[in-house]
Image (cartoon, helix red, strand yellow):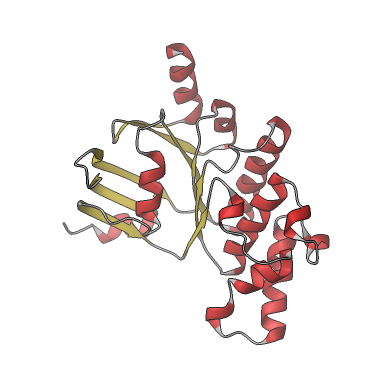
Amino acid sequence: MLIDQSVITDNAINVRDLTFAWASGETVLDRCTLSVPKGEFWMLLGTNGSGKSTLLRLLAGLLKPKSGDITISDRLGFVFQNPDHQLVMPTVGADIAFGLVSENLTYPETRQRVESSLKAVNLAEMIRRPIYALSGGQKQRVAIAGAIARHAEVLLLDEPTALLDGENQLDLVASVRDLVKQKNLTALWVTHRLNELDYADGAFLLERGQVIDKGDPMRLKKVLLEKS
């Protein structure tokens, strides 16, 4: 299927009629369609098994769809639910620098990228801090800093607050919202926490592998609260 180039200009993420099934034959996504505007912070909601995390992995190229189209306009950064799955080096600075190895940067260039990205997530003073000594929220910030250091302009975040307590949850979501606005990034954030919708520009509601509602996050929040 061809995608209208005018749509690509306005959106950072375009998904058209995306279908995915496991080898067992179980269909997870069924002709799923959505678009995320450039420079905005959108959330993806749905019950367990609705296909949220699978969709994010398809967008990141970690899975291949059965059919449909995916168009991403800019470089991607992916943040896992559990940061321990993607932080591999012993210290904060070393971990971010490790993600830049393939870019063949000089040492000063690498250092500048690392320092700049940590400053963006308010962790500048932790460049030498051991990863094991960080809180869960700080680890997620390091993962986000790694994406920023690689000049990712589209962030995919798979329930990044799932392992955090209440205060750290809202602190992280507010930080990502601010990054989106300050750096003109685009973010798609998977969540099941309705209070996080207060920080979003828009939201999608996924059910049985299809987007059944989208738009104003406060309206969707009200709809879901009324159902609960």
Please state which of residues 87 and 198 is positioned toward the viewer in this rendering. 87
Considering only vertical position in the picture, is 81 above or below 70?
A: above
Where's residue 192, x and y in %?
A: 50, 30
Farthest front residue in view: 24
Can you see residue 120? yes
Q: What residue do we see at 32% from left, 43% from top?
A: 34
Residue ID at (41%, 28%): 47
**Pick the front one: 122 or 64:** 64
Report the side of 20 relative to 145 (left or right). left
- Number of numbered callouts drawn: 0
Instruction: Give the x, y percent position of residue 170.
Output: 67, 35
In which quadrant of the rendered view does residue 22 lie? Answer: top left
**Side (left or right) of 199 relative to 220:** right
Question: Which part of the image, by quadrant, shows the N terminus?
Answer: bottom left
Q: Is residue 122 visible?
A: no
The residue at the point 55 percent across, 29 percent down is: 193
Compared to residue 69, the image places residue 21 above or below, namely above
Residue closest to the eye, 156 or 9: 156
Query: x and y percent of residue 37 in the render?
Result: 42, 49
Camera-nearest residue between 99 and 76: 99
